[in-house]
Image (cartoon, grey):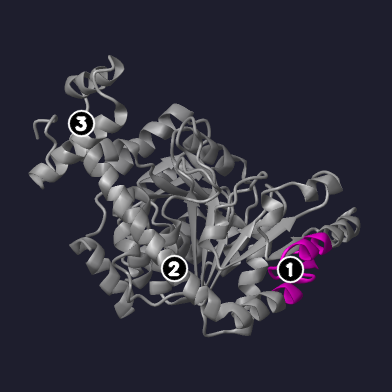
Amino acid sequence: MDTRVSETKEAKRIPQRVLIGKVGLDGHDRGAKYVAHILRDGGYEVIYTGIRRTPKQIVETAIQEDVAVIGLSLLSGAHKRLLQQVMDLLKERDASDIVVIAGGSIPSADIPDLKAMGIAEVFRPGVSSQSILETFASLVKARRPAA
Amino acid sequence: MTNDTQDLVEQVRAGTSQRVRATARLMSLVENYPERIPEFLVGAADWPQARMVIGLTGPPGCGKSVLADRLIRAFRTRNPHNSIGVIAVDPSSPFTGGAFLGDRLRMMRHASDPNVFIRSAATRGHIGGLLLGIKAFIRVLGLAGCRTVLIETVGVGQNETEIVDVADLVVVAIAPGHGDAVQLLKCGLMEVGDIFVVNKGDCEGAAQLYAQLLAVLRLNANGQGRRGADSCLVSALHGRGVEELVDLLEKRAADSEEAWRSRRRQTMVDDVKEAVLEEARQRLSRRLGTGPLATKDFTRILRGEITVPGFVDELLQQLTGTGEVKDHHGGG
């Protein structure tokens, strides 16, 4: 059997798994649900974890679910501290190959700091669904899973 | 068993810090490469297995996930040293292939409990309320040391009853507000429960539904030789009736553990049969090939030059004749 051909077929067919949720204390989940909906319709398997989760809950869930991407929505203003905790825990668990994306009311002045800590992308209010899908697709494609 | 699978299996067995990741990756292999499922059934004869595999099924929105959350908590409290694995299945879109997996949301308080492993899964086109690789998933959770496995099916209608073949014990949850007592007489879902739960016991109509359920179950028990179903009235949201349900589950496990083990041995034989048939199907399919040559073959049948059974005879002879499986049409 020509495995090369069948592998490309597989790659097309296998849905990517992503986690969408919120960390910290704000309870506004409209944005997170909107993104989950867009990704669902874009062919992703979205594990939706809801509001008010701790960084540890998010990281353990991401590992058990073997997701390629974690997307976290934050509107509380505590994004730097919470995202740093998520990144630290991922490193601690040898899971830094999982891509982390943030979204929500995050001041653009904070974006360089977030990128420096390893956040792959930051979506601010008003981003188009097309742009979200394109960003997820390119990040998933570029991801190199740990051996 | 292929090398990468074997490596992951060893990591899970050895209980290294990578155990959880390796367990999750094995499950992804099962999901992403269905052709490798037999490795997890046939090649896993010496893996430890769960003591009890519980199937939790019922219509959408009847509270299965909240009930699952309560069951996890009850099992963890009763047996603090035992691990529990949960497989929560939700449907894939037949249009986009995407899925919204929202069961786990109700169980998030267990996310940092190292003795609870929860995996959400999409059906990916599989019919029956589960995913294709469900049995392999159960074996992987057994390997990871789970004593109890809880499977939450997709929200079912009336006829998704595959869970019976997969679980030792089936809990059917129903809730008030989904029709009158006539629904309880319909075939399918109402035939598969070992334990029936009326959930949302705090809601209007629950007591009446429970009374109707008891009447129907009594009729069932009269008509059949097998053990009648148990039942209980639960409010998963408020945690009422959950301990009674766990008592029922534990009692069933104590009574039937031996029977379950022998049934699993029997189904392993069936799994091998499935794996053999699948391999044969794939070989025949490759031999048949695609493209103009296959079309030529089929045209012979359409013209009446050869019958379907006659053609299959030819195909099988070609296979055994070469003893080799090469894609003879594909030029590979």
Q: At which x and y percent is residue B130?
A: 52, 51
How far, Cα to Cα, is label 3 from label 2?
Answer: 35 Å
Q: Is residue B33 above or below residue B296?
A: below
Q: Residue at x 82, y 43 (%)?
A: B179
Query: In the image, what residue type sits under mark 2?
Result: Gln
Q: Which residue is mark 2?
A: B266
> Quick one: label 3 or label 2, which is nearer the N terminus?
2
Q: Position of residue A64 (x, y in %)?
A: 43, 62
Residue A2 in view here: no
Number of numbered discs: 3
Q: Label 3, on which residue? A: B289
Amino acid beneath label 1: Gly
Q: Are marks 3 and 2 on the same chain?
A: yes
Question: What segment carries the magenta color?
Answer: B217-245
Host chain of mark 1: B
Q: Secondary structure at mark 1?
A: loop
Chain for disc number 2: B
Query: Element type at marker 3?
Result: loop
Say which residue appears at 48% left-offset and 47% top-offset.
B122
Residue neighbourhood size for the residue with mark 2, other residues' Cα within 10 Å, grouped as few (<14), some (14–19), many (≥20): few
Would you identify the image quadrant in which residue B253 lies? bottom right
Chain ID at mark 3: B
Q: Which mark is residue B228?
A: 1
Vertical comparison of B221 with B81: above or below: above
Q: Residues within 10 Å of mark 1 (few under 14, many from 20)?
A: some
Is residue B218 within the magenta segment?
A: yes
Q: Position of residue A146 (x, y in %)?
A: 25, 58
Same-chain status of marks 1 and 2? yes
**Contact? badges 3 and 2 (CB < 8 Å):** no
- Which mark identifies residue B48? none
Quadrant of the drawing holding the C terminus of chain B: top left
